[in-house]
Image: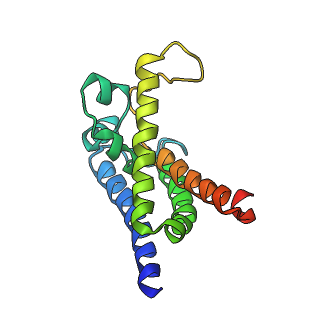
Amino acid sequence: IGADLGAMADATKLLIGGCVALYAASLLMSPGAFQPRGLLGLLSPRLEALFLLGASGPVPVFGLGHWWTLLSAAWLHGSLLHIFFNLMWVRQLAPPVAELYGAGRMILIWTAGSITGFLASSAAGAFLPAVPFLSSRAGFTVGASASIFGLLGALLVYGRRSGHSALRQ
């Protein structure tokens, strides 16, 4: 059991540490990122830095053929508030998913959520630009939300299959 707990903690640290490291790198690559621009723009990396590090979206995926961004964009964030709230959810959801499925499968669930979410949003942006609520005008997307919803979905599936009432609620 001790090794399992260590693996779960290490997997969560990997997710959080990876996101923080790439956020710091994106800030260092962004001249002017440390100048105050209001609460929502506080410590926001430049689009150029996010693009170089692997932002996803219809432009990189379908316009440039950068399919690898379906994996990389989940590790990037657009502001201090963005990374704060995403990592708060990772800290809450990753440990129980790792406990139920194992640390390795938790990382696979994170990755599958990233691929599915960024592929769907990129396709909607590229092929459904005129349909309200299904697309956005954003050519680039970043953030861990798709992966977080993958973790949340894994918990819901476990709750339904096991009949565990706490997870269903």
Say which quarter of the image contains residue 50: top left
Front-most of 164 and 128? 164
* Coloring scheme used: rainbow
| Residue 5 coordinates in the image, percent (x, y) | 47, 80
Give the number of marks.
0
| Residue 85 coordinates in the image, percent (x, y) | 55, 54
Q: Residue at the location (58% across, 51% down)?
A: 153
| Residue 147 coordinates in the image, percent (x, y) | 47, 49
Q: Residue at the location (28% across, 52% down)?
A: 28
Residue 77 shows in the view:
no
Q: Is residue 72 left or right of residue 121?
A: left
Front-most of 35 and 48? 48
Say which quarter of the image contains residue 69: top left
Residue 125 shows in the view:
yes
Q: Residue at the location (33% across, 45% down)?
A: 71
Q: Is residue 89 above or below residue 65?
A: below
Question: Which part of the image, by quadrant, shows the C terminus?
Answer: bottom right
| Residue 11 coordinates in the image, percent (x, y) | 40, 68
Residue sitting at the far bottom: 2
